[in-house]
Image (tube, helix red, strand yellow):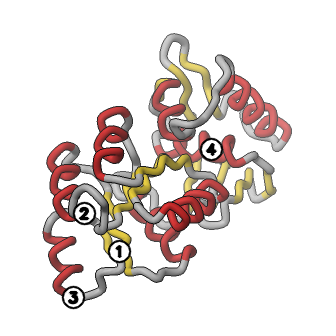
Amino acid sequence: MRILLIEDEEELAQAVARGLQKCGYAVDTAFSAGEALDYWAAYRYDVTVLDLTLPDMDGLMLLGRLREAVPDARILILSARSAVSDRVKGLDLGANDYLIKPFDFLELEARIRSLGRLRFTEAGDTLRCGGLTLDLAAREARFNGRPVSFTRKEFGILEYLLLHKNEAVPASRIIDHVWDSDADLYPDSLKYHIHSIKKKLLAAGAPDPLVQNVRGVGYKAVEK
């Protein structure tokens, strides 16, 4: 999942970004509304976390512009503005959720997970495909009940493929949602990770291919 964090307090932004990256998310950080709009023009985000106090534009105004640009965007306001009227206004203007500072990181991550599932039919924090189970909360994988150890990046790739199972997903879309804009990818990065995923799945007894190459397009997770 790829997240845009819009937060002008640099120390807080870096701490939150590090925490989310440890959870396996790709995170881009904007310290102003102008930076955020530039990011949005270049990339598509699964979830946007928005502070309302920004140096160059009120966060609620930015919220309106983001919602207008991408009507189905998932936006979580993260703000010290705690009055009921502020929360109601933010939600009325199009935020999907509102979390008040100070906050518990585990709650923030849980709310981001929830927003990330909005357009998908899977229930709860579990994704399944052909015997493979991903626990999104614990960031754990199992095949037929047996643990399978994936790196954070491999888990992120599998999560995105399972959210679109039986659909051929272009390699560029996988990269956009699993790597952030600062990532230094070498040409075969995705192929290397896919190869490693397949090898681990085969070793765990998964059918070949549970993750399939689609020539000229990308990859898909196959549930027969």
Question: Number of labelled discs?
Answer: 4
The answer to whether 165 is drawn above or below residue 91 in the figure is: above
Judged by depth in the image, the label closer to the viewer, 4 or 1, is 1
Quickly name the residue at label 3: 84
Judged by depth in the image, the label closer to the viewer, 3 or 2, is 2
Judged by depth in the image, the label closer to the viewer, 1 or 3, is 1
Task: Decide: few, some or many residues near mark 4? Use Cα within 10 Å; few <14, some 14-19, many ≥20.
Answer: some
**2 or 1: tag closer to the N-terminus:** 2
Q: Tell me, yes or no, whether the two marked residues, 2 and 1, touch with CB atoms within 8 Å.
A: yes
Judged by depth in the image, the label closer to the viewer, 3 or 4, is 3
Quarter-wise, where is residue 213 in the image? top right
Q: Quadrant of the C terminus?
A: top right
Viewer-nearest residue: 98 or 65: 65
Q: Calculate the distance from the C-alpha at mark 2 to the C-alpha at mark 4.
A: 43 Å
Task: Decide: few, some or many residues near mark 2? Use Cα within 10 Å; few <14, some 14-19, many ≥20.
Answer: many
The answer to whether 151 is drawn above or below residue 16 in the figure is: above
Q: Tell me, yes or no, whether the two marked residues, 3 and 4, touch with CB atoms within 8 Å.
A: no
Quickly name the residue at label 4: 130
Determine the residue positioned at 30% across, 60% down: 55
**3 or 4: tag closer to the N-terminus:** 3
Question: Which disc number belongs to residue 79?
Answer: 1
Q: Tell me, yes or no, whether the two marked residues, 1 and 3, touch with CB atoms within 8 Å.
A: no
Judged by depth in the image, the label closer to the viewer, 2 or 4, is 2
Task: Decide: few, some or many residues near mark 1? Use Cα within 10 Å; few <14, some 14-19, many ≥20.
Answer: many
**Image spot of residue 65 (x, y percent):** 17, 50
Task: Residue at the far front: name it.
Answer: 55
Q: Calculate the distance from the C-alpha at mark 4 to the C-alpha at mark 1.
A: 41 Å
Q: Calculate the distance from the C-alpha at mark 2 to the C-alpha at mark 1.
A: 9 Å
Q: Calculate the distance from the C-alpha at mark 3 to the C-alpha at mark 4.
A: 46 Å
**Image spot of residue 69 (x, y percent):** 19, 43
Task: Residue at the far top: name it.
Answer: 216
Quickly name the residue at label 2: 59
